[in-house]
Image: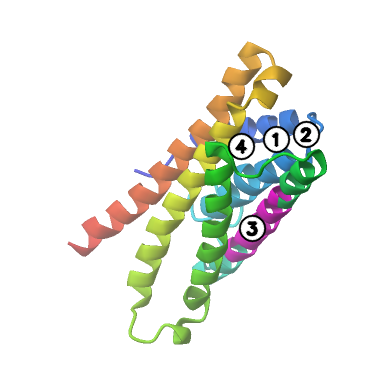
Amino acid sequence: MFMSQSLCETHTICSLGFRCFVLGLFSWHPFFMTLAFSLFMTEAILLFSPHGSPIKRFPHKTKGRVHWILQCLCFTCAVLGLAAISYNKHLNGKPHFTSWHGLLGLLTVCVVGLQSLAAVPLIYHSLAKGWSLAKLKRYHAASGLVTYLLGSVSLLLGLCSAWFTAAVMEYAWYLSVLCPALSALIIMNQVTSAYMAKKRLQS
């Protein structure tokens, strides 16, 4: 089954609270990364939810275009976040990408860029000769879910960093961890439920 309306509302409140909390911390890197994955990428996927989408009455083609725009905004913010931390490390003479958070974060930004480029044939289907639109959508949804999970794990690893754990109290840390974890579960439920429902209809 698709997610309920109350679950979508819970996610929205949780996501807004998480973003406002990170806004209070003086760092451009977590700000841009949280904006990229907690806002733009999450909302890009939720556009296709029959309960949580603000444009659920719009044609699927329109949703696809808005989804792609949000994904491009996600990639832009992710690149800015990556540039911010790279420049900060350069100024302080620190090595780059030495932690699991840094390595996975770099991989995630690259994958988001590839995922956005790979979506172009979905918008202009004539570019993908020999591929059915249904098969392209299925592959895009599967790879998109993997990309989102990579972003969620990167966020969680960032919350485990020495900087973040020193900046917040214990209870606030647990609440912060709950937000990306809950978002990941909701997105997994939406994507898997949607394609399981399509398979049942086709069988």
Q: Which residue lies at the image location 53% right of the left edge and 68% below the top edge?
A: 59
* The label number, if any, that marks residue 33 in the structure image: none
Asked if disc 1 and disc 3 are in contact, CB closer than 8 Å, the reply is no
Q: Tell which circle, 1 or 4, labels the residue nearer the N-terminal end.
A: 4
**Mark 3 surroundings: few (<14), some (14-19) or many (≥20) residues within 10 A:** many
Separation (CA) of disc 1 from disc 2: 6 Å
Nearer to us: label 4 or label 2: 2
- Left or right of 65, for residue 1: left
SS class, disc 3: helix
Nearer to us: label 1 or label 3: 3
Q: Colour mode? A: rainbow
Separation (CA) of disc 3 from disc 4: 21 Å
**Mark 1 surroundings: few (<14), some (14-19) or many (≥20) residues within 10 A:** some
Q: Which residue lies at the image location 56% right of the left edge and 38% below the top edge?
A: 101
For label 3, the residue is 75
For label 4, the residue is 12
Q: Position of residue 95 (x, y in %)?
A: 67, 42
Could you tell me if residue 119 is visible in this image? no
Q: Which residue lies at the image location 73% right of the left edge and 32% below the top edge?
A: 22
Separation (CA) of disc 4 from disc 2: 16 Å
* The label number, if any, that marks residue 23 in the structure image: 2
Q: Which residues are magenta?
A: 67-82
Tell me which amino acid carries mark 2. Leu
Separation (CA) of disc 1 from disc 4: 11 Å
Separation (CA) of disc 3 from disc 2: 19 Å
